[in-house]
């Protein structure tokens, strides 16, 4: 279990030089509340920010946290992305910025926003809000331009020095050995040739890395000669936005050739600095501010264009087609999103490995990603090839397929991995939904319904509710898709504490499912309506409705997600009615059914009920064991709301065993998780009196002062650290 405070990405390659910049950043992070690293793409801002944040993390009680903004096409998901980054999974109806400000209000942490240049205005506005309300917050931003936020301290990131310092040459040698451990600069003249390459590339790290990747096809001396020729000829004999031909891939399809943007390395620039901005200006000319080292930015474009020319035609095509992906991807996703025409699935695999070999795509285990600067270059080519719409269609189809498979696999043995996959591909799913809402309403309605429950469980309640509402409003929808959308709206509203809306959508689900004779829809509606009734103090009505629907829908398989959840309503209702023996038997049967199928979500709530029943029956040790089982399941699912519930029942069970200080600490950790989801304690109604009695018992066992100290320790602990402590089984009496 992770116990470190905060989250920073792993460094997957060596870090070279930057001593002066790191010293300056150390001072800035100590004395300033907001620092922005600026410089053109590829100059090393992200790596420098990551190294500085890692060095500073221990100075912040609540750690250092990282938000990558590069995949965001606009500011629509800025707040959810930043909230996710700092561990907030708000379950309330508040404005998201209000929830974020409150969450950060008493935190002492470092927040890094990486690649903010395309969201300068929204980022500036957001940072002005949270820096005002969160006095313990320090922010480090990377951007191609300053954000313009009041109090912003700007640090320019230069390229690596190439004259009199070994840093650029060391980076070249390191990347050479990373690609081939046997490679080096050992042959006569290699070191001088490598130094000349670094000088020609003006010390820009990304350009040097791309050049080092070309050594597999050239010697160091040959590479130096080719780069020298390319750069010497860069400004001569080139027409504005000229095209000298294409390399044919297939009938009717072209790829960039030596005279096209990227083929000659100039991107068809107008003038020295590429500032024309006219209709013919390539998109890459506009990626960075033309006032910051425009010549060096031009050098990077030349290096990328040269790397692009070294690719095979199919590798270039894959480079372009990968660009709609917002998050890390595997080979299966690459095939789904990119295969077509000359790129067969097998060719996708081969071309992907070629792009990895040339450092265009980075590999980490079985996952792949592309740097934002290289993705932008590929997007330019996607547009040049006239494939932007087709690529977006393939991307949307791929993630609609993922939503279908995840929905079908919810109650199977891969539930946890599907849960994580949906969570980890959130930005791609949102991008696919946006595209489907514009171009395929039926697909959007299906997707929003199938993925909505995952999002609700992952804490993306606002997105689940918003997309379900937009899908319903986009056009007519009938049958199971309509019922699912109503159900998603109701579940999200229920988790946000909006019981009136949940009740309304439960009734709409019931009516629609009855009309369609949709048994699964009926079970889903009974779950939603029953849970709403339980939370509003009507357990008898919930029990009667769940039993009736379970009898009506006998044709639905026993391991169906909706059937299992409907049985859960029966268990909750029996407990609330005081029929503990019946409830325990039903919960045990339900848990076994879930265990046989590898289902964790419903099983965790069966454990919760077994913990509550044992506590009500005076068996606190058994209650604690069931509570820890629930917490282990909810931790696997990253379900903060479920963890908060589990910590409450565990604390009560520990207190009932006389371990007052330990109970107080677990109560404190539970309070931290309740804050994480934005609610005060919100267990099932019958837990309230038991919790209060056990809390008084814990205070009496150790005294008010010791209880308060332990509670505050649990509350101030990093949530993961506190959860790890709660899961230990030994009692401290």
Image: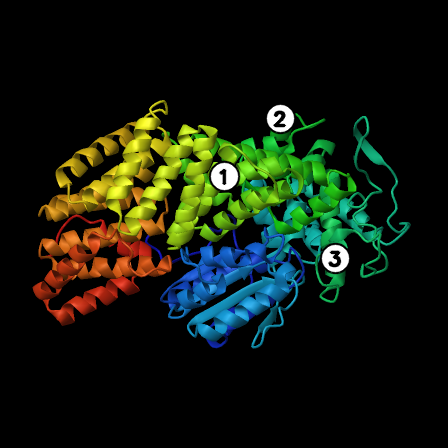
Label 1 with label 2: CB-CB less than 8 Å: no
Please give the label number shown on residue 345. Answer: 2
Q: What is the crowding at mark 2: few (fewer than 14 residues within 10 Å), some, or many (at least 20)? A: some
Q: Earlier in the sequence, mark 3 or mark 1?
A: 3
Q: Is 596 on the left or on the right of 367, as rendered?
A: left
Q: Which residue is mark 1?
A: 449
Q: Secondary structure at mark 2?
A: helix
Q: Is 252 on the left or on the right of 697, as rendered?
A: right
Label 3 with label 1: CB-CB less than 8 Å: no
Instruction: State the residue in front, 209 or 724.
Output: 724
Q: In the rendering, at what x and y percent does residue 440 appear? A: 64, 37
Instruction: State the residue in front, 27 or 214.
Output: 27
Q: Is residue 245 visible?
A: yes
Q: What is the crowding at mark 1: few (fewer than 14 residues within 10 Å), some, or many (at least 20)? A: many
Above-or-below relation of 158 to 342: below
Spatial separation of the CA atoms under disc 2 and disc 3:
34 Å
Q: In the rendering, at what x and y percent does residue 218 appear? A: 70, 38
Q: In the rendering, at what x and y percent does residue 207 appear? A: 67, 51
Q: In the rendering, at what x and y percent does residue 96 appear? A: 48, 61
Instruction: State the residue in front, 582 or 386.
Output: 582
Q: Which residue is mark 3?
A: 286
Spatial separation of the CA atoms under disc 1 and disc 2:
30 Å
């Amino acid at each position: 279990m992770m116990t470190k405070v905060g989250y920073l990405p792993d460094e997957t390659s060596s870090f070279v030089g930057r001593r002066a910049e790191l010293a300056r950043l150390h001072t800035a992070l100590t004395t300033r509340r907001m620092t922005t690293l600026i410089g053109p793409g590829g100059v090393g801002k992200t790596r420098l920010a990551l190294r500085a944040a890692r060095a500073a993390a221990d100075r912040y009680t609540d750690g250092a946290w990282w938000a990558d903004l590069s995949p965001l096409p606009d500011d629509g998901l800025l707040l959810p992305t930043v909230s996710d980054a700092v561990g907030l999974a708000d379950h309330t109806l508040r404005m998201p910025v209000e929830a974020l400000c409150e969450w950060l209000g008493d935190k002492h942490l470092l927040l890094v926003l990486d690649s903010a240049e395309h969201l300068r205005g929204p980022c500036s506005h957001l940072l002005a809000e949270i820096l005002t309300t969160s006095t313990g917050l320090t922010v480090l931003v990377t951007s191609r331009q300053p954000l313009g936020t009041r109090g912003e301290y700007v640090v320019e990131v230069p390229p690596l020095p190439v004259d009199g310092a070994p840093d650029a040459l060391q980076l070249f040698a390191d990347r050479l050995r990373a690609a081939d451990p046997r490679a080096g600069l050992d042959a006569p003249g290699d070191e001088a040739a490598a130094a000349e390459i670094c000088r020609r590339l003006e010390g820009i790290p990304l350009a040097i890395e791309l050049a080092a990747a070309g050594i597999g096809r050239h010697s160091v001396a040959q590479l130096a000669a080719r780069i020298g020729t390319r750069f010497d000829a860069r400004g001569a004999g080139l027409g504005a936005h000229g095209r000298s031909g294409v390399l044919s891939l297939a009938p009717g399809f072209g790829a960039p050739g030596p005279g096209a943007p990227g083929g000659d390395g100039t991107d068809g620039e107008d003038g020295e600095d590429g500032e024309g901005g006219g209709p013919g200006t390539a998109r890459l000319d506009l990626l960075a501010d033309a006032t910051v080292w425009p010549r060096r930015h031009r050098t990077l474009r030349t290096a990328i264009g040269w790397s692009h020319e070294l690719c095979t035609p199919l590798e270039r095509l894959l480079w372009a087609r990968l660009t709609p992906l917002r998050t890390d991807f595997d080979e299966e996703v690459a095939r789904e999103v990119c295969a077509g025409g000359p790129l067969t699935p097998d060719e996708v695999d081969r071309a992907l490995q070629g792009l990895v070999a040339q450092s265009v795509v980075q590999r980490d285990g079985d996952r792949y990603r592309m740097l934002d600067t290289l993705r932008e270059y590929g997007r330019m080519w996607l547009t040049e090839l006239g494939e932007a719409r087709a690529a977006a269609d393939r991307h949307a189809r791929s993630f609609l397929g993922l939503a279908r498979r995840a929905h079908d696999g919810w109650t199977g043995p891969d539930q946890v991995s599907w849960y994580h996959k949906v969570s980890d591909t959130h930005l791609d799913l949102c991008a696919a939904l946006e595209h489907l809402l514009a171009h395929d309403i039926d697909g959007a309605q299906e997707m929003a319904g199938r993925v909505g429950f995952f999002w609700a469980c992952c804490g993306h309640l606002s997105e689940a509710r918003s997309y379900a509402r937009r899908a319903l409003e986009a056009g007519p929808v009938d049958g199971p898709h309509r019922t699912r959308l109503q159900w998603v709206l109701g579940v999200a509203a229920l988790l946000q504490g909006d019981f009136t809306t949940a009740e309304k959508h439960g009734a709409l689900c019931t009516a629609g499912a009855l009309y369609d004779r949709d048994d699964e829809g009926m079970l889903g509606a009974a779950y939603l309506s029953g849970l709403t009734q339980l939370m509003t103090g009507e357990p008898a009505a919930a029990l009667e409705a769940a039993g009736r629907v379970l009898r009506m829908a006998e044709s639905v398989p026993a391991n169906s997600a909706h059937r299992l959840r409907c049985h859960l309503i029966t268990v909750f209702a029996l407990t609330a009615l005081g029929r503990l023996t019946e409830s325990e038997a039903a919960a045990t049967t339900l848990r076994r059914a879930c265990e046989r199928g590898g289902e964790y979500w419903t099983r965790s709530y069966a454990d919760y009920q077994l913990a509550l029943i044992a506590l009500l029956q005076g068996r606190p040790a058994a209650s604690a064991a069931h509570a820890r089982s629930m917490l282990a399941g909810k931790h696997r699912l990253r379900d903060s709301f479920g963890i908060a519930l589990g910590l409450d029942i565990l604390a009560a069970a520990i207190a009932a065993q006389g371990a007052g200080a330990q109970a107080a600490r677990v109560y404190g950790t539970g309070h931290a998780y309740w804050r994480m989801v934005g609610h005060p304690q919100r267990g099932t109604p019958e837990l309230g009196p038991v919790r209060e009695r056990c809390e008084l018992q814990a205070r009496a066992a150790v005294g008010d002062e010791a209880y308060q100290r332990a509670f505050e320790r649990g509350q101030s602990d990093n949530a993961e650290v506190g959860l790890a402590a709660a899961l230990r089984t030994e009692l401290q009496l």
